[in-house]
Amino acid sequence: MDNQSPERISLHDKYFRKHIAFEEIALRTAGIARQIQADYADKAPVFLVILNGAFFFASELFRNLSIAGAEISFVKIASYSGTSSTGKMKQLIGLDTRITGRHIVILEDIVDSGLTVHELSHDLQESGAASVSIASMILKPDALKYPVEVAYAAFRTPNDFLVGFGLDYDQLGRLYRDIYIAE
Ligand code: 5GP
Ligand code: MG
């Protein structure tokens, strides 16, 4: 076992145990990539990655995609503090890509209440996007409070707090290659 993949970790005041192995994440993400490849092959989409959490998921997805005219852009949004949603969104790095008339695929790490992707989709539609869809590594169906449709989700999980593979607990834990669950 290497340092990147222990069975149990501690971050700040909490313990977490291994929950989803990288190999499973890679497999499911490749499955989503196949669907996106088929759906967007002739649409020259803009992939909009929500920083920081979604960048591991996004890069794994991009390794499996090859779409002519596709672009990648980033926004940085925070709605979480510690292990719970604040219910308010802060856009920390804004959108710098022209999206009028473009097909947008939002890439998110976790859709929890749905607030983040709901507000972002709304903004993109207001700005004249031709279409907006959502791909999320994880969907927590029981936590959904906003009317969002997640077209592509690698995993559906209960409302447990997860870290690893880009996901943090107050900035710690992003670098683990597997996903861990709070004990
Ligand atoms: P929402 O706006 O859907 O309520 O919250 C989505 C954001 O909350 C995600 O982008 C993610 O950063 C964060 N989040 C939700 N659940 C978890 C979780 O279990 N672990 C971590 N690390 N972040 C989460
Ligand atoms: Mg996030």
Image: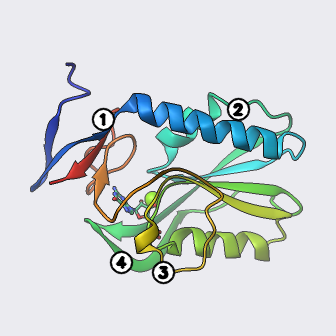
Q: Give the structural element (helix, strand or loop) at label 2.
A: loop
**Residue 16 against residue 99 in the figure, above or below:** above
Mark 4, Cα crowd under 10 Å, few <14 / some 14-19 / many 20+, is: few
Q: CA distance from mark 3 to mark 2?
A: 31 Å
On the picture, is 133 further left or further right than 163?
A: right
Mark 3 vs mark 4: give the one in front: 3
Asked if residue 152 can be seen in this view, the reply is: yes
Whole-angstrom CA distance, mark 1 to mark 2, is 24 Å
Up/down of 130 relative to 137, above or below? below
Going by the image, does 71 lie left or right of 111? right
Numbered badge on residue 145: 3
The amino acid type found where label 3 is placed reads: Lys
Q: Residue at x 14, y 54 (%)?
A: 183
- Provide residue 95's location: percent of width, then percent of height: 67, 60
Q: Is mark 3 within 8 Å of ligand 1?
A: yes
Q: Could you say which is closer to the camera, residue 73 or residue 122? A: 122
- Measure the C-alpha gap from mark 4 to mark 2: 34 Å
- Asked if marks 3 and 4 touch (Cβ < 8 Å), the reply is no
Q: What amino acid is labelled 4 in the image?
A: Thr
Quadrant location of the N terminus?
top left
Return the disc, 3 or 1, that comes first in the chain's sequence: 3
For mark 4, what is the residue? Answer: 86
**Which of the two discs, 1 and 4, labels the residue nearer the N terminus?**
4
Label 2 crowd (10 A; few <14 / some 14-19 / many >=20): some
Residue 94, position as x, y percentages in the image: 61, 62
Q: Earlier in the sequence, mark 3 or mark 2?
A: 2
Q: Which residue is mark 2?
A: 65
Residue underneath mark 1 = 176
